[in-house]
Image (cartoon, coloured by chain):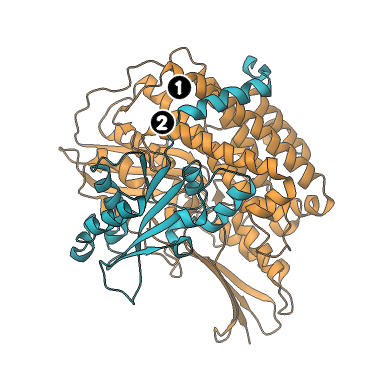
Chain colours: A orange, B cyan
Amino acid sequence: MTRRITIDPITRLEGHGKIEIFLDDAGEVSSAYFQIPELRGFESFCVGRPAEEMPGITNRICGVCPEAHHMAAAKAVDQAFGVTCLPAARRIRELIYHAFMVVDHTTHFYCLGGPDFIVGPDAPPEERNILGVIRKLGLDSGKKVIDCRKRNHELIKQLGGRGIHLCGALPGGWSVPVTKEQQAVFRLFAVENINFAQFSLKAFENLVLGNKTYYDLLFSDTYYHETHSMGSVNSQNSSSYYDGMIRVVDTKGRQIALYNPADYQQHIAERVEPWSYLKFPYLKQLGWHGFVDGQQSGIYMTTPLARLNVSDCLDTALAQAEFEKFYDCFDARGKGEGGRNRPVHYRLATHWARLIEVLHAAEKMLELLDHPEICDPHVRQSVEPGAGVGIASVEAPRGTLTHHYETDDHGILTRVNMIVGTTNNNAPISLSIMKAAKGLIHNGHFTQGILNQVEMAFRLYDPCCSCATHALGKSPLELNLRRQSDGVLVDQLLRC
Amino acid sequence: MVCLLISCCVVEKLLKGCWCWMLTAEKLVIGLGSPFLADDSVGLHVVRQLQTKGLPGVRFVESHAGGLLLLEEMEGAKQVIIVDAMQDEQHQPGEVLILGINGSSQNASCSHDCSLHQALNIGRTLSMELPADDAIHLVAVVAKDLTSFSQQLTPDVEAAVEPACKAVQRLFGF
């Protein structure tokens, strides 16, 4: 007789998710699934609306990553209307986007992913949160986190019109320029962001790399998968969040695809499973071979870790130094195909990669604010709506986000498709949950701490189910433990 | 990288100066909800209507998320009113309820960070300047439809927008 475990709702993710774990008669895990029980609906809701409304509509899909949808939508509308974004407006978009990357990653590390390392994976759930992190790191660290969020939200609010669901994007431009006074203040924000990122990386080094238990966890086989990596890169093959070509490297570090986001349909196919509303994208050139990892599998990931794996460098000085330190730690620098870094597949390293991206994004903010024309007032232009196709990608904090629009002669949307970061990561998330469950649950024995370690396997992806299904609503998670034979619920964790 | 040589002390002073010109007000109204989910948007409607009334010393915020975002908005305010839709089978759609901080809705939580209670707890732990619990109220409008894709309120809830505005004004002593 097989039993079934359900983790529902999964904690510390955005959107509703459910983990189902099935146990056989011996109490061993026979299968595990990450399910998204929400129904997608945003795409059909948007058809028939003027395309220029999309930055304002799609940013409501999620309360956490509206900036990612706003920018992807703005870029897709530019393309559909055949207009190139004005240089000053593009710099403002990038500045806001990098501020968003800083604040989103910071929130994930200190509120969602970090507590597992800083407070401990076995700590009681009521302590495994940001308050527990503050208690462990000290009040000053809590102030740093709140100040980081506040200053970057202030920048987004001033340039984006609203702090949460910004409304600044216009076809081919931006609503307001940066003033000289703002430039001076935002420059200080960027410097503070750099200092904060360095503080966070130091904390990670001390608390995780300097602690044998956590160090071993980082290198644990329980959280190891060899999949291909995907992310956007610039002309130097450095990770690029606002714009770039999509690069895919295989499990050995060899480039197997480099394409314009507009060509995504030539490279990506989507698998549908009857038990989830969320599709499972895979690489067309390798095909779908089921939920298996390895060089022959078509499964890929698009995460902060994936973005480091596809990059040959990071194009800012301090982040580059951390990038090198990261691959040195895994003895992987220059050890991959053709002298590239060997990809890191230890999934918990994603948390470290996330902090390196905070530093990279903060340095990019400073670069943008030091641009001699950052205060150029020419940020708007006249644009004629019309028929076209617009396909654009940004690197959302949790992976590559693509918006695809088609418009008629009046600029009205006739087709909308979105592939978001969590969708790209759907198959590897399922793989990771399966491996963690099989490695941690034996003889039907499990504890809260063990189930939390199963959750850690998916939490590292920073999944956003609201975005992935484009659904609106609450976002709890549940874990169900069930018998395989009859589906009877053996135990359940419910968290909100 | 010259800027990195600026001493922490100087940066701190400059940043304190920056915060000064950022908008603060003693009274704050936060409208919560999604504009595309029928009655869920009632908090936004109420905030927008209140903005036309010329209330002095009041700051207005529209939000789709809670948790730490609300904490950041609340810093410096003496009195805060959150306006939100509410599901309650004990009351009729369109009824306006005034609740204390313990009545804050699920929407005041953010699954990406924490609940409003936790956020306030964090803020107080960090000695942030926050309103007392009894200076935080929830004006809740009982909703009928929170799931349909619609930018329209249902009639009963639409009729409750003005009464909800009056409730906010009364709480502020206008």
Q: List x then y, in percent, for residue A382.
A: 22, 24
> Mark 1 or 2 closer to N-term?
2
* Amino acid residing under circle 2: Gln
Chain of the residue that carries numbered disc 2 in the rendered image: A
* Amino acid residing under circle 1: Gln
Q: Secondary structure at mark 1?
A: helix
Say whether mark 2 and mark 1 are on the same chain: yes
Decide which of B64, A424 is in the foreground and name it. B64
Crowding around mark 2 (Cα neighbors within 10 Å: few <14, some 14 to 19, many 20+) is some
Residue A7, label in figure: none
- B108, above or below B8, in the image: below
Q: Residue at x 48, y 64 (%)?
A: B102
- B95, above or below A467, in the image: below
Left or right, A80 with reference to A112: left
Decide which of B130, A73 is in the foreground and name it. B130
- What quarter of the picture does the N terminus of chain A occupy? bottom right
Kindly identify which residue carries mark 1. Answer: A182
Q: List x then y, in percent, for residue A446.
A: 71, 74
Residue lying furthest left: A410
Residue A158, label in figure: 2
Residue contact between numbered discs 1 and 2, judged by CB atoms under 8 Å: yes
